[in-house]
Image (tube, rainbow, N blue to C red):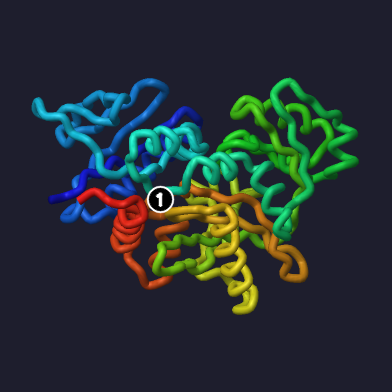
């Protein structure tokens, strides 16, 4: 009997539509002969299932079920692809834990930690991972232009400490840009990160593990056509994404080893993607960890899977079936 899987998308941030695109990608990747798939779209308290005929069915949040043709349908597994709250910050993971529904990504602690860029980077710094100098501002806090210039310097990046997809990010090159950039970032999240600019080569590396194996994908080099890897570069083709990256074999090995170590330190599950900047002297600097990375057909992870000579369908099956083994499983 086929297991029924919810591909959970949407969310409550500016990344809503990016998430829906990832859901379509995942829907195309998962083996439909093996699983019955439904996309569950969430926005605030509006949770509904997209039905094959285009209609929508409301989700009963008491047990994460819906009604189809008069019959109650429950889910065996949730593939979370919300980029932002509540799917990337641990909230939805806690909900599924309480309902005893297995899901595709890491648990509450790792999700909430990695969602906060400042907290995650400072935590990993304690394990010897190189990061940029940074300042954190929480809602209601402020910083003077002089403090930013003295402690961080220019140019710098001012961005939300929560979330992704480059919403609310500004590359600041002049003193008068600092306060408007902080205001812009606070419009996206309640925490803002002021981070030193690092000049180098941007790369990203995906990874997933099961009890039986560790898979670290080929590395992608990112060359933005814009001043930095912004939303247009990420989603509208204004960048060159080169897999495998044009870096030495030794550096490739070091990045892949570090990615695997970060996975273990965080206690991750499913696919993660770790972004880095390589600065002079082949120094590896962490940018951020993504525990629900983009999964459109052209996203980094599918590119890296193809470069590894693997099939997305097999990777999806591997993650789903191994979660059932870890969970205790439903047959």
Q: Which residue appears at 42% of the width and 69% of the height?
A: 213
Q: Quadrant of residue 51?
A: top left
How many numbered dots are placed on residues in this image? 1
Instruction: Describe the element under mark 1 as helix, strand or loop.
Output: loop
Position of residue 117 measured from the top left corner of the image (x, y, whole percent): 64, 43
Q: Nearer the viewer, residue 306 or 286?
A: 286
270 relative to 132 in the view: left or right:
left
Position of residue 59 measured from the top left corner of the image (x, y, whole percent): 27, 26
Q: Compared to 54, does 125 lie above or below?
A: below
Q: Compared to 138, does 200 lie above or below?
A: below
Q: Nearer the viewer, residue 327 or 138?
A: 327
Looking at the image, which residue sits at the far bottom? 249
Q: Quadrant of residue 81?
A: top left
Which residue carries the number 1 mark?
295
Disc 1 crowd rating (10 Å Cα; few below 14, some 14-19, many 20+) is: many
4 relative to 71 in the view: left or right:
right
Looking at the image, which residue sits at the far left? 69
Q: Which residue appears at 32% of the width and 57% of the height?
A: 325
Position of residue 240 measured from the top left corner of the image (x, y, whole percent): 53, 59
Can residue 222 be seen at all in this image of the molecule? no
Can residue 44 be seen at all in this image of the molecule? yes
Q: Which residue appears at 44% of the width and 58% of the height?
A: 301
Q: Which residue appears at 35% of the width and 38% of the height?
A: 8
Q: Nearer the viewer, residue 328 or 83?
A: 328
């Amino acid at each position: 009997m086929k297991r029924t899987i919810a591909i959970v998308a949407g969310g409550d941030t500016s990344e809503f539509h990016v998430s829906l695109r990832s859901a379509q990608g995942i829907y195309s990747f998962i083996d439909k002969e093996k699983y019955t798939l439904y996309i569950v779209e969430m926005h605030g308290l509006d949770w509904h299932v997209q039905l094959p005929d285009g209609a929508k069915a409301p989700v009963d949040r008491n047990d994460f079920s819906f009604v189809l043709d008069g019959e109650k349908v429950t889910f065996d597994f949730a593939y979370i692809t919300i980029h932002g709250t509540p799917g990337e910050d641990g909230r939805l993971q806690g909900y599924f834990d309480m309902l005893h529904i297995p899901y595709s990504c890491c648990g509450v602690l790792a999700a909430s930690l990695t969602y906060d860029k400042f907290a995650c980077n400072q935590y990993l710094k304690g394990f010897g991972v190189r990061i940029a100098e940074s300042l954190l501002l929480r809602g209601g806090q402020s910083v003077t232009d002089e403090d930013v210039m003295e402690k961080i310097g220019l140019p710098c990046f001012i961005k939300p400490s929560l979330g992704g997809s480059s919403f609310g990010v500004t590359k600041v090159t002049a003193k008068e840009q600092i306060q408007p950039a902080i205001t812009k970032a606070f419009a996206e999240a309640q925490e803002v990160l002021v981070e030193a600019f690092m000049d180098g080569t941007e790369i990203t590396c995906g990874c997933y593990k099961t009890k039986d194996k560790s898979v670290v994908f080929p590395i992608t080099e990112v060359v933005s056509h814009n001043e930095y890897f912004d939303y247009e570069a990420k989603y509208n083709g204004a960048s060159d994404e080169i897999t495998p990256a044009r870096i030495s074999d030794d550096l490739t090995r070091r990045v892949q080893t570090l990615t695997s170590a970060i996975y273990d330190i965080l206690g991750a599950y499913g696919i993660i993607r770790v972004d880095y900047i390589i600065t002079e002297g082949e120094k590896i600097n962490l940018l951020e960890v993504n525990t629900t990375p983009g999964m459109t057909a052209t996203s980094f992870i599918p590119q890296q899977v193809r470069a590894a000579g693997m099939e997305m369908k097999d990777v999806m099956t591997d993650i789903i079936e191994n979660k059932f083994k870890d969970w205790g499983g439903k047959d």
